Amino acid sequence: MSVSSTFEGLKRNAPGVVLFGGLFAIMVLLAQNKWTRDAIPIRSIDAVDATIEGVYWDKTSMSHYGVFLENKVLVFVDDDKPRLIGSRVRLERVTRDNGFVFYRFAE
């Protein structure tokens, strides 16, 4: 089996190479964004009461919970522990120095 290095062979493989290169570049950019977010120091952590209203299981072992805060705002929180729908929980509202806000279950 010979590998064609002619111009015709390169033209035939170009769309696949461009697609693969573009997807790889997007994955690297998204990973850098997450690394940057995780490296920013935490400014404050506030306790918030909430009620679990629903759950969505992803292909991973992580569950995404739909949680209503005490002011009736719906947020989604990722967690790998099972939680009972309808139960009251304590969340932490985490604010980073750049203003990024996310919620996590209090331990």
Image (cartoon, rainbow, N blue to C red):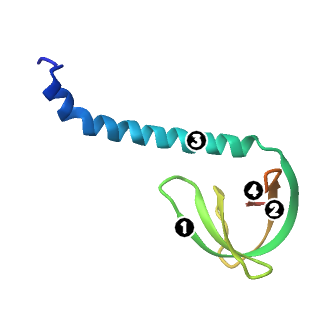
Q: CA distance from mark 1 to mark 3?
A: 23 Å
Residue visible at 18% across and 19% down in the picture: 5
Q: Are marks 4 and 3 in contact (CB under 8 Å)?
A: no
Neighbour tally class for label 3: few under 14, some 14-19, many 20 plus, Cα within 10 Å: few
Q: Is residue 25 visible?
A: yes
Q: Picture coordinates of residue 9 (x, y %)?
A: 16, 27
Q: CA distance from mark 4 to mark 3?
A: 17 Å
Q: Is residue 2 above or below residue 13?
A: above
Amino acid at the residue labelled 1? Tyr
Q: CA distance from mark 2 to mark 4?
A: 14 Å
Neighbour tally class for label 4: few under 14, some 14-19, many 20 plus, Cα within 10 Å: few
Identify the residue position indicated by label 2 in the image.
92
Q: CA distance from mark 3 to mark 2?
A: 24 Å
Residue visible at 44% across and 38% down in the picture: 24
- Indicate the secondary structure of the residue bearing disc 4: loop
Q: Is residue 94 above or below residue 38?
A: below
Counting residues from the start of the chain, the first of labels 4 and 1 encountered is 1
Q: Which mark is residue 31?
A: 3
Identify the residue position indicated by label 1 in the image.
56
